[in-house]
């Protein structure tokens, strides 16, 4: 992800200071106000040092996340096997997590990083987004064993739909959905992949 210049080995202390500065600034001022100049000043390095290793602030944020300096763990509710209950519980947990301004800023930063460079998008998906998607699919799959989900249902599509709904609201700074909107989304999911047992 970060790219050093041939013949000029990276200073490991400066590298660590830069990523730590990214973590601190993202928490304190958010992604929108985080700049290369601010990162360089806080890390005590010249801004050209930062630009030599990273092409953009989104790449900086992506590396800080992948280096483990910024946590993006989300609470996963306990699956009950009841499709409607589990979908609702996941939505509520996701909304509570994204209500944190620093978390929302991080999500926007990661989306920008993925949009900026294919390399960052691939690494973020392999190490972060992909595993989170599989965890959500496994969570939903509890409904298969209880007969709540049709055997031919594509849980990947459901996971993508739920994640996209949350991402849309964060990226567009939309307010949290109302209880009625959550009910409608749960009904849409249950109606789309649920069995008759789930509907009742």
Image (cartoon, rainbow, N blue to C red):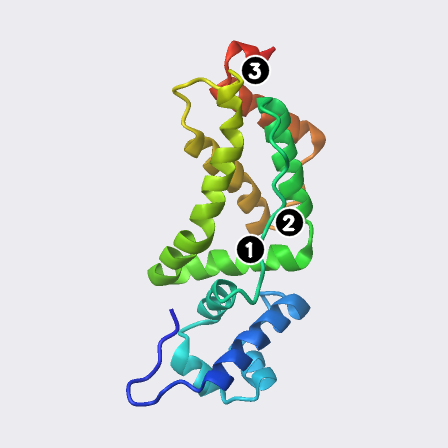
| Residue closer to the observer: 172 or 57 | 57
Q: Which numbered disc flags the more N-terminal residue, 1 or 2?
A: 2
Instruction: Say if 11 sits above or below 106 in the image.
Output: below
* Category of crowding for the residue at label 1, using alpha-carbon neighbours closer than 10 angstroms: few (below 14), some (14–19), many (at least 20): some
Q: Which numbered disc flags the more N-terminal residue, 3 or 2?
A: 2
**Residue 107, numbered label:** 1
Q: Quickly name the residue at label 2.
A: 98
The kind of secondary structure element at disc 1 is helix
Q: How many labels does the image show?
A: 3
Q: Do the residues labelled 1 and 2 touch (CB within 8 Å)?
A: yes
Say which quadrant the N terminus sits in: bottom left
Q: Do the residues labelled 1 and 3 touch (CB within 8 Å)?
A: no
| Residue closer to the observer: 82 or 181 | 82
**Residue 198, numbered label:** 3
| Residue closer to the observer: 101 or 129 | 129
Instruction: Say if 197 sits above or below 138 in the image.
Output: above
- Tell me how far mark 1 sits from mark 3, CA to CA: 32 Å
């Amino acid at each position: 992800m970060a790219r050093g210049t041939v013949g000029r080995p990276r200073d490991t202390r400066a590298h660590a200071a830069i990523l730590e500065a990214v973590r601190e600034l993202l928490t304190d001022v958010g992604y929108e106000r985080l700049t290369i100049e601010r990162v360089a000043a806080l890390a005590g390095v010249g801004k050209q040092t930062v630009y030599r290793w990273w092409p953009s602030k989104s790449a900086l944020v992506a590396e800080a996340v992948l280096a483990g300096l910024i946590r993006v763990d989300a609470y996963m509710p306990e699956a009950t096997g009841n499709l409607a209950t589990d979908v609702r519980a996941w939505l509520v947990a996701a909304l509570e997590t994204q209500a944190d301004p620093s978390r929302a800023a991080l999500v926007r930063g990661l989306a920008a990083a993925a949009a900026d460079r294919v390399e960052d998008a691939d690494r973020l998906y392999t190490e972060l987004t992909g595993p989170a998607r599989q965890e959500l699919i496994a969570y939903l799959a509890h409904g298969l064993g209880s007969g709540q989900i049709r055997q031919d249902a594509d849980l990947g599509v459901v996971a993508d739909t739920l994640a996209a709904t949350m991402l849309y609201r964060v990226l567009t700074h939309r307010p949290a959905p109302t209880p009625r909107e959550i009910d409608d989304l749960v009904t849409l999911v249950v109606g789309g992949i649920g069995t008759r047992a789930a509907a009742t």
